[in-house]
């Protein structure tokens, strides 16, 4: 017996086939998937090492039975002013989970609903709106094979989105890579242009003069290296401008492809998960928030003040740094136990299908939200299955490889940029986010040859930091590091 599902890690959206013989499970890449055609990176290949239960798996609510726990959460929600309550969601949640979370927030009157995708994607959302009139990704992986030049900037695609990079390598395109480090991607490019951190805008502005860009059918691929910086929206618009000025848009093999970090980061964008009251900076500073419900993310790494919050509720499938600090921990289903949809970087809706029963008393995120909503007396949360939610969402899941967009060049105001110390955090091929799932895999841990006590900091722009330090090359990334 075999059936299909989708990898839960990155936004590439690789199809997976699970076959069962007795109690044995076998995982392979889905050869029929138009996304990966059977290919899987090492994280996808080792997913079965991360399923089931281990000592960190959350199997029951932390403060009592489900009934008692939901009752306690209800009391917190009823006794706290609504502007002091917030939901913090994740691009790991499925379309159905995010839809129900947004419906719950709207029904109860919570305006502070945000997603961890805000940290990486919203500069692209704003740039798309300015350039195309709407948040549209006009291209797809098909364009990789139609392009003559592939321009990769701010993305170590080979390590972070390996199957997209496999497509790039299989294509006949001339590959140009721009990065601050000579990454795995840079090493395999036809042309590597190394820039100092923060100095990529001048290079983007000059693209219109480069023959390999202006005279060819060019597809640009970017990721967080471009979108996580103080002037990220302008950088994305400058890149789109270069495509507009050279006619490299609205044609096969031409355009701009943003690679999303998480499996359903695109879904959160579509559903409109975004604070309606606080600005993003205010949300992440958490000063106003007294009750925070975190789902499927580990903001110990990104929301540094979260320990100040009066009541921290966390839904997750496994123990994390954040669950350690939580007042209430809710056991959520893991990837292998969940059914629903995710939307990948090229806008395809893909199915996740459960192939194991929920571990212990864990429940899907949508079901946990419905329990809280119903305890608060809200109507419209009586779903029996994810399929019922998908039906209500009424999404047109027709897919087209290219979408025509408006071409509105955006005027980028020059800014007086000063460059101090820069932090460029990369991602490792064999680990994912805060390692809450990947660290369960022995194979992935063996492949991660990281110095736990070292930090890689760009040595050209941070000469002060490197003074009097013993600098060595990190074994894995080959970047200069110092200890301590
Ligand atoms: S490329 Fe991304 S979606 Fe594909 S197998 Fe690897 S982690 Fe999963």
Image (cartoon, rainbow, N blue to C red):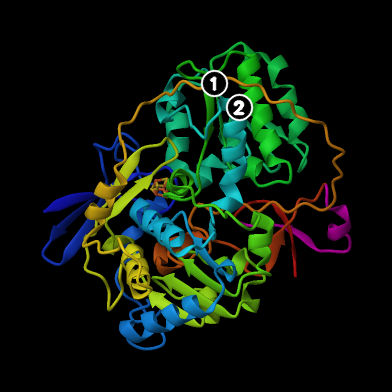
Q: Looking at the rendering, in which quadrant would you find the N terminus? A: bottom left
Residue 468 horizontal/vertical position (percent):
88, 63
Write down the quadrant of residue 222 in the picture: top right
Kindly check if marks 2 and 1 are in contact, taking CB atoms under 8 A apart as contact: yes
Crowd band around label 1 with a 10 angstrom C-alpha radius: few (<14), some (14–19), many (20+): some
Residue 161's tag is none
> Which residue corresponds to mark 1?
406
**Magenta residues?**
461-475
> Which residue corresponds to mark 2?
131
Confirm whether residue 102 shows in the render: yes
Q: Quick one: 33 or 478, which is closer to the camera? A: 33
Q: Looking at the rendering, in which quadrant would you find the C terminus? A: bottom right
Residue 311 horizontal/vertical position (percent):
55, 79
Q: Quick one: 75 or 242, which is closer to the camera? A: 75
**Magenta stretch contains residue 462:** yes
**Residue 400 horizontal side relative to residue 77, left or right:** left
Q: Distance between the residues labelled 2 and 1?
A: 7 Å
Write down the quadrant of residue 360 in the picture: bottom left
Toward the bottom, the furthest residue is 64
Above-or-below relation of 253 to 9: above
The disc, 2 or 1, on the residue closer to the chain's N-terminal end is: 2
- Who's the residue at 75% across and 37% down the image? 195
- Who's the residue at 42% across and 49% down the image? 264
């Amino acid at each position: 017996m075999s059936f299909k599902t989708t990898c839960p890690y990155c936004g590439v959206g690789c199809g997976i086939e699970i076959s069962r013989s007795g109690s044995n499970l076998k995982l392979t890449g889905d050869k029929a998937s138009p996304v990966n055609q059977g290919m899987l990176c090492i994280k996808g290949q080792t997913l079965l090492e991360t399923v089931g239960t281990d000592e960190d798996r959350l199997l029951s609510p932390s403060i009592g039975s489900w009934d008692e726990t939901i009752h306690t959460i209800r009391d917190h929600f009823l006794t706290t002013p609504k502007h002091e309550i917030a939901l913090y969601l994740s691009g790991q949640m499925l379309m159905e989970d995010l839809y129900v979370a947004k419906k719950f927030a709207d029904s109860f009157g919570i305006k502070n609903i945000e997603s961890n995708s805000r940290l990486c994607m919203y500069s692209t959302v704003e740039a798309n709106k300015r350039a195309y009139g709407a948040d549209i990704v006009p291209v797809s992986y098909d364009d990789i094979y139609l392009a003559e030049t592939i321009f990769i900037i701010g993305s170590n695609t080979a390590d972070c989105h390996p199957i997209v990079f496999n497509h790039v390598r299989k294509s006949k395109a001339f590959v140009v890579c721009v990065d601050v480090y000579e990454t795995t991607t840079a090493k395999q490019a036809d042309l590597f242009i190394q820039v100092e951190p923060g100095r990529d805008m001048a290079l983007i502005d000059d693209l219109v003069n480069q023959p390999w860009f202006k005279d060819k059918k060019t597809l640009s691929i970017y990721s967080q290296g471009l979108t996580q910086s103080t002037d990220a929206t302008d950088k994305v618009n400058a890149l789109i401008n270069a495509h507009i000025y050279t006619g490299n848009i609205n044609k096969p093999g031409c355009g701009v492809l943003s690679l999303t970090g998480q499996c359903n980061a695109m879904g959160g964008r579509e559903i409109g998960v975004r604070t309606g009251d606080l600005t993003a900076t205010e949300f992440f500073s958490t000063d106003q928030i007294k009750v925070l419900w975190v789902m499927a993310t580990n903001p110990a790494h990104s929301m540094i003040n979260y320990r100040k919050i009066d009541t921290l509720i966390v839904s997750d499938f496994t123990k994390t740094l954040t669950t350690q600090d939580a007042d209430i921990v809710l056991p959520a289903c893991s990837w292998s136990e969940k059914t629903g949809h995710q939307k990948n970087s090229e806008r395809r809706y893909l199915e996740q299908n459960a192939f194991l029963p929920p571990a212990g008393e864990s429940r899907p995120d949508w079901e946990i939200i419905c329990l809280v909503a119903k305890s608060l007396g809200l109507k419209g949360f009586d779903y029996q299955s994810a399929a019922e939610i998908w039906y209500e969402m009424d999404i047109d899941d027709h897919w087209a490889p290219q979408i025509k967009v408006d071409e509105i060049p955006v005027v980028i105001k020059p800014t007086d940029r000063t460059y101090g110390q820069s932090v460029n955090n990369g991602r490792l091929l064999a680990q994912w986010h805060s390692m809450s799932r990947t660290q369960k895999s022995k194979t992935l841990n063996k492949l991660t040859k990281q110095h736990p006590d070292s930090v890689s900091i760009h040595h050209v722009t941070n000469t002060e930091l490197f003074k009097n330090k013993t600098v060595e090359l990190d074994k894995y990334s080959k970047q200069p590091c110092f200890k301590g």
